[in-house]
Image: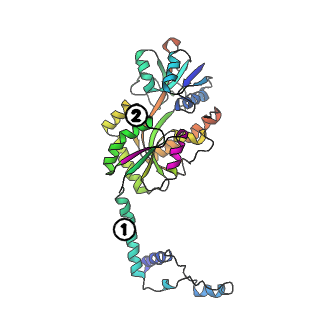
Amino acid sequence: MGKGAEHDFIAYQSNGAAPCPRVEDRAGAWARRPPSVLCSTVQRSWAPLPTLRLLAILAALFSSTAFAVYPERPVTIVVPFAAGGANDVVVRIIQQPLSEALGQPVIVENRGGAGGNIGFGAVARAQPDGYTLLLAPNSFAVNVSLYDKAPYDPFKDFEPVAEISFFPVMFAVRPDLGVNTLRS
Amino acid sequence: MNYSTPGPGTLPHLATELLKLRTGIDMVHIPYAGAAPAAHALVGRVVDVGTMSITVAMPQIKAGTLKGLAVTGAERWPDLPDVPTVEEAGVPSSVSETWQGVLVPAGTPKEVIDRLAKALIEIAGRADVRDRLRTAGFAANGRGPDAFAKRIAEDVPKWKEVIEKARISVK
């Protein structure tokens, strides 16, 4: 049966019942403990294999179509600040185009507090199913050092998707200060 | 010398402390509660230097009441072609940029990440989106998972160094 048989066997094992020890193993194990009554010998029979193979194929089809049709419902973007800030400006600009691209409503959820940590922590613990997104500014990279206990790990708890925009800041003086360059 | 910022832990604060680390110059931080009072403190001669977003500085620069010494980006800002970058001004490894990007919880299927990344990069590249971002003070910069991951991987240790050496605290 080759590879197909292997898959069927694995599918069966993962079904719940533990496979029985092989007879030669049992002989040695016998002295230590009796064979479990919960084990199953069915994997030795070919009878359930067509059904199992069908189930495995259906499972594979289902899992690939599940992502092929993503998203099936509205997608939420968490902004870790109160409405009206810089991140809100960006998310409001991309909200409608993203909704059109995904074919689903995109909901903006402002979850401010603790310099963004409330929102970062909430998305870190959200279901990793593509229905909860985080619009993060660089405080995402800052807060882990700025706060004693940031409720997220920027590397372990998240997968980066895309950078949208950036901006620098500037050093400014009054013209009458007589300074024309940063060096001076 | 002293300098104003919109508050402790903000990018203007971190960027100035990074500049201090790289140059050894000494300036005292005077934090304000927001961008407008921080800029007013500079115009009103309360502080010597103000570190602020370009959006905040632009009206003052156009009015001639403020002058830009350097921008902290890797490249010059399109609206301020005569203002050099910090690195052009002679301070290496001193780029400070804030970014806005999308992340998802770890474990999100790759197919989903790819779908979202493709859509977001395309959106960030649209002329009307770029214009709207530009008007609001942002440079559109649609980049995918790898480039964004690199940015985060560089920023975390950079700001850790600045925060520790400058003993920055938000408490």
Q: Is residue A121 magenta?
A: yes
Count of marks overlaid on the render: 2
Where is B131 relative to A69, above or below?
Answer: above
Per the rendered image, the range of residues in magenta is: A106-122
Residue A46, quarter of the rendered image: bottom left
Residue B88 in view of the camera: no
Where is B105 relative to B123, above or below?
Answer: below
Where is A56 relative to B11, above or below?
Answer: below
Locate the N terminus of chain B and report the quarter of the image it occupies.
top right
Locate the C terminus of chain B and report the quarter of the image it occupies.
top right
What type is the residue that disc 2 sits on? Answer: Ala
**Residue where numbered disc 2 is placed:** B139
Task: Determine the secondary structure under disc 2.
Answer: strand
Residue A87: x %, y % from top left: 44, 38
The answer to whether dots 2 and 1 both sit on one chain is no
What type is the residue that disc 1 sits on? Answer: Leu
**Residue where numbered disc 1 is placed:** A61
The chain letter for the residue carrying disc 2 is: B
Residue A103: x %, y % from top left: 31, 51
Identify the residue shown where x is 34% and y is 59%.
A69
Q: Circle 2: is it few (<14), some (14-19), or many (20+) Cα within 10 Å?
A: many
The chain letter for the residue carrying disc 1 is: A
Q: Is residue B11 magenta?
A: no
Disc 2 from disc 1: Cα separation: 42 Å
Task: Determine the secondary structure under disc 1.
Answer: helix
Where is A70 relative to B36, above or below?
Answer: below
Q: Is residue A169 left or right of residue B171?
A: left
Identify the residue shown where x is 62% and y is 44%.
A149
Residue B62: x %, y % from top left: 40, 18
